[in-house]
């Protein structure tokens, strides 16, 4: 399947981003030339997946499409109970919404934004404990997605141990640069959790990509099949939550898989209220069939070599342009270090959001901010939270773009890097209470020197 890409002029894009309130989510995708907003549900499906969709059975209960999905998920993840959901955050809603009470703690290598929101709307606290290896974006450590085991152990044996509801490991670590987690780290975190009597939950959105990195980088795994590494990763978990829109290679869908029958029964009760009967959850039969195929296809090592290689190619091209990124390249995305590229824009002025808007104007490329905008406010104090890094994430959809298209992204960044001080900070003019980055609106601060004639840019604080 091919899709036309509409060419836009720089002038058009200046007007379009202003009309979008300098929020990249408010652009029409037809106005974007290379769309790296997300790798979620944006990939191309295979011929086998399209063929499988034709077999989709839309029975309300007991459909063979569900049975095919259940078989595939059991085989790939090795957990007995499989509950489909409409996407990953629905899996979070079913499980975390049931598990958590106010005052409790979820501790993670890195909560994704929706995961954090699902923790915080119950009144619980989400704590991230990334490994110290992730402190320096330029250090090429192999497993910068790991959880800090020392801090985890201290929490689980300290005065707040009784408040910890679960340990949640996100593979790969999306908010931490798409960096992988080692198998040794997952196993150790699981032991600590179980010693403390709390479950180990795996956020498995990109588990195949993580397994590929384990094979490439972790001592002793070079000869293992990715499929076996995936099984070993899940063997340490009690619960797996998955947004199937990533490594399920589908456009919509999610999963909760568990080992415990009673837990499954309680999840089914919630599923019937919020998602649907447990043999479809939030999914159509045809989508379950596409996912059943996708879960197996994603383990194909030729595919993974190309996939991870393509992201790496983008990373190398951006580095060659003199633009700092989180190193090494992530599995699904390149994280441009906007804080380092734009030191003249303070965190309060959203440097990664500003860079995202500049990149759209420069090259018609859409990324997403992973920084102070996304972090939102502390639910207790109401203060803005500032992460350690202000990153612009360029997520590569699976099986969609060519290397050449990605090179145009690096070229656009290179042009911005020639005159970085022309990128001005932003002031937030509208914000929602939770997950504000999806709908926030901004106004530019200062006048971009290169384009003094853009209408509307004159009326600013
Ligand atoms: N967990 C992780 C690690 C994710 O990256 C996402 C989504 C979710 C959970 C939620 O899943 O979107 O299916 O409800 N990440 C997308 C992204 C949106 O752009 O990174 P969902």
Image (cartoon, rainbow, N blue to C red):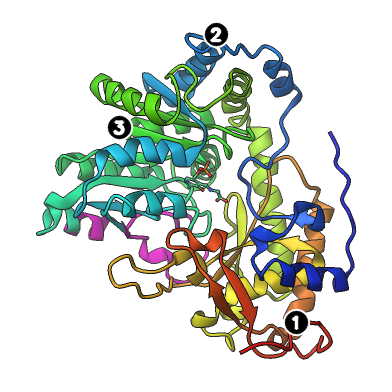
Which residue is labeled 1 in the image?
A: 456
| Displayed quadrant of residue 3 | top right
Q: Is residue 4 left or right of residue 277?
A: right
Q: Residue furthest left?
A: 159
Say which residue appears at 46% left-offset and 30% top-offset: 255
In depth, the one of 455 and 9 nearer the eye is 455
For label 3, the SS is loop
Which residue is labeled 2 in the image?
A: 64
For label 1, the SS is loop
Say which residue appears at 60% left-offset and 70% top-offset: 441
In depth, the one of 256 and 319 nearer the eye is 256
Mark 1 to mark 2 CA distance (whole Å): 56 Å
Crowd tier of the residue under label 3, counting other residues whose Cα lies within 10 Å: few below 14, some 14–19, many 20 or above: some
| Displayed quadrant of residue 190 | top left
Which residue is labeled 3 in the image?
A: 238
Q: Is residue 64 visible?
A: yes
Q: Which mark is residue 397?
A: none
Question: Which quarter of the rendered picture does the C terminus lie within?
Answer: bottom right
Question: Which quarter of the rendered picture does the N terminus lie within?
Answer: top right
Q: Is residue 268 left or right of residue 199?
A: right
Asked whether disc 2 touches disc 3, contact meaning CB atoms under 8 Å apart, the reply is no
Which residues, given as a range, are shown in magenta? Answer: 127-154
Q: Is residue 374 magenta?
A: no
Q: Is residue 81 left or right of residue 175?
A: left
Q: Is residue 128 magenta?
A: yes
Asked whether disc 3 touches disc 1, contact meaning CB atoms under 8 Å apart, the reply is no
What is the x, y in percent for residue 272? Answer: 39, 24
What is the x, y in percent for residue 136? Answer: 47, 72
Mark 3 to mark 1 CA distance (whole Å): 54 Å
For label 2, the SS is helix
């Amino acid at each position: 399947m091919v899709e036309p890409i509409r060419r836009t002029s720089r002038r058009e894009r200046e007007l379009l981003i202003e009309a979008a309130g300098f929020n990249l989510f408010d652009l029409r995708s037809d106005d974007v030339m290379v769309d790296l907003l997300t790798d979620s549900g944006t990939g191309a499906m295979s011929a086998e997946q399209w063929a499988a969709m034709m077999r989709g059975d839309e029975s309300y209960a007991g459909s063979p499409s569900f049975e095919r999905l259940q078989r595939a998920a059991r085989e790939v993840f090795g957990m007995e109970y499989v509950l489909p959901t409409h996407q990953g955050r629905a899996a979070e809603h079913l499980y975390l919404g049931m598990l958590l009470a106010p005052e409790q703690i979820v501790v993670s290598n890195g909560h994704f934004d929706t995961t954090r929101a699902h923790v915080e709307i119950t009144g619980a606290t989400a704590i991230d404990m990334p490994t110290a290896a992730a402190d320096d974006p330029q250090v090429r450590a192999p497993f910068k997605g790991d959880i800090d085991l020392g801090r985890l152990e201290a929490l689980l044996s300290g005065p707040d141990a009784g408040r910890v509801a679960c340990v949640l490991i996100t593979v790969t670590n999306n908010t931490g640069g798409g960096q992988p987690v080692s198998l040794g780290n997952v196993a150790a975190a699981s032991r600590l959790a179980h010693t403390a009597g709390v479950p180990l939950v795996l956020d498995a959105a990109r588990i195949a990509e993580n397994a590929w990195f384990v094979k490439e980088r972790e001592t002793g795994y070079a000869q293992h099949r990715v499929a076996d590494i995936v099984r070993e990763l899940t063997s340490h978990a009690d619960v797996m939550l998955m947004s199937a829109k990533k490594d399920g290679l589908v456009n919509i869908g999610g999963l909760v898989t568990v080992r415990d029958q009673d837990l499954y029964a309680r999840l089914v009760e919630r599923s019937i209220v919020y998602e649907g009967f447990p043999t479809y959850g939030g999914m159509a039969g045809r989508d379950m069939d596409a996912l059943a195929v996708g879960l197996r296809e994603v383990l194909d090592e030729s595919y993974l070599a190309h996939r991870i290689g393509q992201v790496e190619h983008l990373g190398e091209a951006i580095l060659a342009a003199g633009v700092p990124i989180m190193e090494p390249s992530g599995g699904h995305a390149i994280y441009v270090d906007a804080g380092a590229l734009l030191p003249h824009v303070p965190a309060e002025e959203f440097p990664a959001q500003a860079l995202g808007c500049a990149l759209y104007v420069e090259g018609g490329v859409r990324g997403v901010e992973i920084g102070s905008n996304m972090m939102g406010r502390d639910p207790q104090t109401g203060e803005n939270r500032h992460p350690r890094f202000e990153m612009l994430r360029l997520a590569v959809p699976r099986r969609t773009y060519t290397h050449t298209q990605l090179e145009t992204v690096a070229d656009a960044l290179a042009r911005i890097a020639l005159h970085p001080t022309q990128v001005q900070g932003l002031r937030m003019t509208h914000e929602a209470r939770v997950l504000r980055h999806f709908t926030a609106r901004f106004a530019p601060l200062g006048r971009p020197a290169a384009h003094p004639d853009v209408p509307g840019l004159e009326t600013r604080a």
